[in-house]
Image: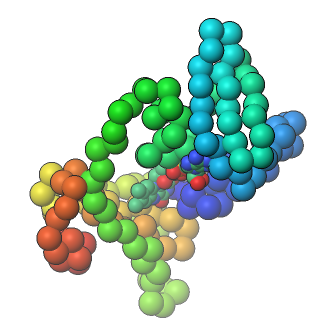
């Protein structure tokens, strides 16, 4: 399991190595589909392409612009990165496993995703609001 900041940076470096032209720090304002191309309007100009891949997250402007999804259903989550207090704590007990528990929060689940030197721990619910999410997290 990986931390996204490192993994995403790795993907960017690999893409650039294989010839991808990266235009960073640029907001996409709109996407429009025409019969033989897609127009992408950004704050740094317009681009045309035969294909686009929209990897712009849960509130995706690409999905909204192309009416692929009207309105995302949002839930609530609380997540923390838990580092052992002393280095001798044995994280290897989690090696090769991930932990999901569907009994810790209503309409959701809790997780423990082990990383090399710490644990990513959290709770998620499909309910848009939940009282005392910290209590479920602590549980
Ligand atoms: C609490 C939580 C913990 C998680 N923990 C892990 C984990 O430990 N390991 C793991 O592998 N995965 C984890 N995930 C899942 C992982 O974060 C997602 O699956 C992944 O980030 C989805 O990638 P994405 O590229 O689709 O969207 P995102 O990572 O959300 O990236 C979308 C990008 O698009 C950009 N963007 C959005 N709109 C525009 C616009 N109009 N113009 C320009 N750019 C735009 C955003 O700035 C963002 O950079 C976690 C998710 C959550 C919610």
Q: Position of residue 11 (x, y in %)?
A: 70, 47
Q: Is residue 12 visible?
A: no
Image quadrant where residue 42 sits: top right
Tell me which residue sits at (12%, 57%) in the image: 106
Residue 107 as seen in the image, left or right of residue 84: left
Tell me which residue sits at (72%, 56%) in the image: 25
Residue 75 as seen in the image, left or right of residue 63: left
Q: Position of residue 89 (x, y in %)?
A: 44, 83
Circle count? 0
Q: Nearer the viewer, residue 28 or 20?
A: 28
Tell me which residue sits at (38%, 31%) in the image: 69
Looking at the picture, does residue 49 appear above or below residue 135? above
Residue placed farthest to the bottom in the image? 86
Image quadrant where residue 82 sits: bottom left
Q: Position of residue 80 (x, y in %)?
A: 40, 73
Quadrant location of the C terminus in the rendered image: bottom left
Q: Position of residue 20 (x, y in %)?
A: 82, 38
């Amino acid at each position: 399991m990986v931390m996204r900041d490192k993994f995403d940076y790795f993907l960017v470096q690999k893409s650039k190595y294989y010839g991808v032209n990266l235009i960073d720090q640029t907001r996409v304002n709109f996407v429009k589909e025409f019969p033989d191309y897609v127009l992408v309007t950004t704050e740094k100009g317009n681009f045309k392409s035969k294909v686009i891949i929209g990897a712009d997250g849960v509130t995706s402007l690409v999905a909204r612009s192309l009416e692929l999804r009207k309105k995302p259903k949002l839930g609530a989550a609380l997540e923390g990165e838990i580092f052992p207090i002393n280095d001798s704590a044995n994280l290897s007990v989690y090696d090769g496993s991930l932990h999901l528990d569907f009994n810790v929060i209503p309409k959701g689940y809790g997780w423990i995703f082990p990383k090399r030197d710490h644990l990513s721990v959290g709770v998620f619910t499909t309910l848009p609001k939940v009282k005392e999410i910290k209590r479920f997290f602590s549980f």
